[in-house]
Image (cartoon, helix red, strand yellow):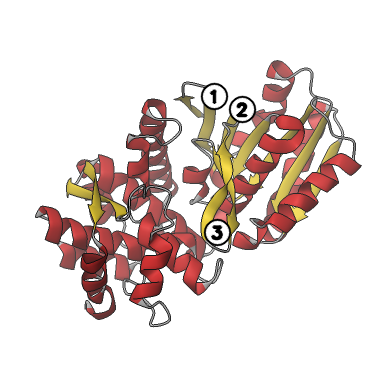
Amino acid sequence: MEIIKIKTPSKSYPVFFLGNNAADSLPGFILDHYAHIRKIMIITDEKVAGLHLHTVKKILARTGLPIYKYIVPEGEQAKTFEVFYQSQCFALSNNLNRKSMIIALGGGAVSDLAGFVAATFMRGIPFIQIPTTLLAHDSAVGGKVAINHPQGKNMIGVFYQPEAVFFDLSFLKTLPDKELRSGFAEVIKEALIQDGSFYDWLISSVSSLEELTEEKLMHMNKRGIEIKAAFVAEDEKESGVRAYLNFGHTLGHAIEGLVGYGKISHGEAVMIGTVYALYLSQTRLGLDFDMKRFIQWVQGLGYGTTIQEICGGADLLSFMKRDKKTVSEMVTFVLIEKVGHPIMKNIPDSEILKSLSYMYEQK
């Protein structure tokens, strides 16, 4: 097992990760570091419960502590006010208190919800992340926890770091292609904003998500987490460089909101936003980048790269103006001057509306 240390101004914590059965060390970690804990609440979703809940409960039983499970809807439907409220009610009705701990078992949505529940229950109790998707390598690290609002994704939330992350590679073996694709979009993003050699490795080594070997999964997860950890260490609460991690997300989140949360996966929407951010980087900054090769590559992996007709330019612009990076009248985008060199740019509305035509028409 490898351990990566995440260091932020508020907390340092380990990611135990990239080996089968990494979760086996969870009971010892809890007993050694959180001897005051008296109850554990697992928050997971309907799909993950059927795949991994029994295994994790069996592992946690070694602590000798009472284990409570709360199962929420799958995907973005978990990140609602109602589910958040019901999770709090479950914790209260089972007499959880400040000597309790929450385990987030699942993908990005469960990670966000469970972290927000932990951050707000009795003003904050410890929580541990157990990611079960490739996408969750991104959401489980960094402490951004939130739920959605109809007017924007992740608009209601806080920064609240976990106590640890246990990334068990064996859980990824049950992922369907759609979920692998969603998480891989974040890996591509991390390479584009930070590491040109990693991007070159990805585009030359990954021609099919169905053929990802354990070795390749291990390398991309490790490097992705290292990249995110570097940004989080420098800027925990996204007042500066951490915003670079939102490359592709400004348009991506707008598409998710307009299409309907959960109707397109987060990663698939981010990939469309990534294509747009690369196009803006070319037209605005003169980025030297082989866009044709990139689009052919990601389309070969199963991604769409154009905007659905349901998403009109004016509606997309309205959603993008709600983006958390935007602090002026113009929408703020993360662009890249070259691979590994991100920059923030305010783009006028007229330019956005004009350039969006590329996203409907590009071949």
Residue 276 circle label: none
- List x then y, in percent, for residue 22: 59, 35
Q: Quadrant of residue 128?
A: top right
The disc labelled 2 sits on which kind of residue? Answer: Glu
Q: Is residue 258 left or right of residue 71?
A: left
Q: CA distance from mark 1 to mark 2?
A: 6 Å
Tell me which numbered mark, 1 or 2, is placed earlier along the sequence. Answer: 1
Q: Check contact, mark 3 vs mark 1: CB within 8 A.
A: no
Q: Is residue 128 left or right of residue 173?
A: right
Q: Residues within 10 Å of mark 3 (few under 14, many from 20)?
A: few
Q: CA distance from mark 3 to mark 1?
A: 27 Å
Q: Check contact, mark 1 vs mark 2: CB within 8 A.
A: yes
Q: Nearer the viewer, mark 3 or mark 2?
A: 2
Foreground of the two, 258 or 103 = 258
The disc labelled 3 sits on which kind of residue? Answer: Leu
Q: Residues within 10 Å of mark 1 (few under 14, many from 20)?
A: some
Q: Secondary structure at mark 2?
A: loop
- List x then y, in percent, for residue 109: 59, 53
Tell me which numbered mark, 3 or 1, is placed earlier along the sequence. Answer: 1
Q: Which residue is mark 2?
A: 163
- Residue at 86% across / 40% down in the picture? 92
Q: Which residue is mark 1?
A: 13
- List x then y, in percent, for residue 359: 27, 73
Residue, far bottom: 309
Residue 175 circle label: 3
- Residue at 73% across / 56% down in the picture? 83
The disc labelled 1 sits on which kind of residue? Answer: Tyr
Q: Is residue 151 above or below residue 9?
A: below
